[in-house]
Amino acid sequence: MFGPIWWILGIAGFLYVLIDILTNQKKMETSTKVIWIVCAVLFSIITAIVYYFVVKRK
């Protein structure tokens, strides 16, 4: 029942991190961008939450 919901949230979390890094984070180092993107692929929902609090709330 909750499978498709988690799948959609995972895709949305990954896309949120990916789009924000590629469009808004011009000053972020390339290695840091790669680490965030890899984490978003592996742990999409958790990474999106951590990314929001660590990067976006500065």
Image (cartoon, grey):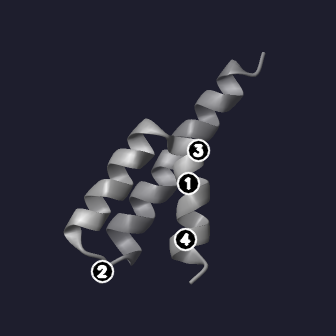
Three-letter amino acid code of the residue under disc 3: Ile
Q: Earlier in the sequence, mark 1 or mark 2?
A: 2
Three-letter amino acid code of the residue under disc 4: Val
- Using the numbered discs, state the Cα–Cα distance from disc 4 to disc 2 in whole angstroms: 16 Å
| Labels 4, 3: front one | 4
| Labels 1, 2: front one | 1
Residue at image location 30% in from the left, 80% down from the top: 26
How crowded pointer 1 is (Cα within 10 Å; few <14, some 14-19, many 20+) is rated as many
> Looking at the picture, how far across and down is residue 51, in whole percent?
53, 63
> Looking at the picture, how far across and down is residue 24, in whole percent?
40, 76
Element type at mark 4: helix
How crowded pointer 3 is (Cα within 10 Å; few <14, some 14-19, many 20+) is rated as many
Residue at mark 2? 26
Q: Earlier in the sequence, mark 4 or mark 1?
A: 1
Element type at mark 3: helix
- Using the numbered discs, state the Cα–Cα distance from disc 4 to disc 1 in whole angstroms: 10 Å
Residue at image location 42% in from the left, 60% down from the top: 19
> Looking at the picture, how far across and down is residue 10, in whole percent?
56, 38
In the visual, does 45 lie left or right of 19? right
Front-most of 19 and 49? 49
Front-most of 7 and 47? 47
In the visual, does 36 lie left or right of 9? left
Residue at mark 1? 48
* Quadrant of the rendered image containing residue 2: top right
Label annotation for residue 45: 3
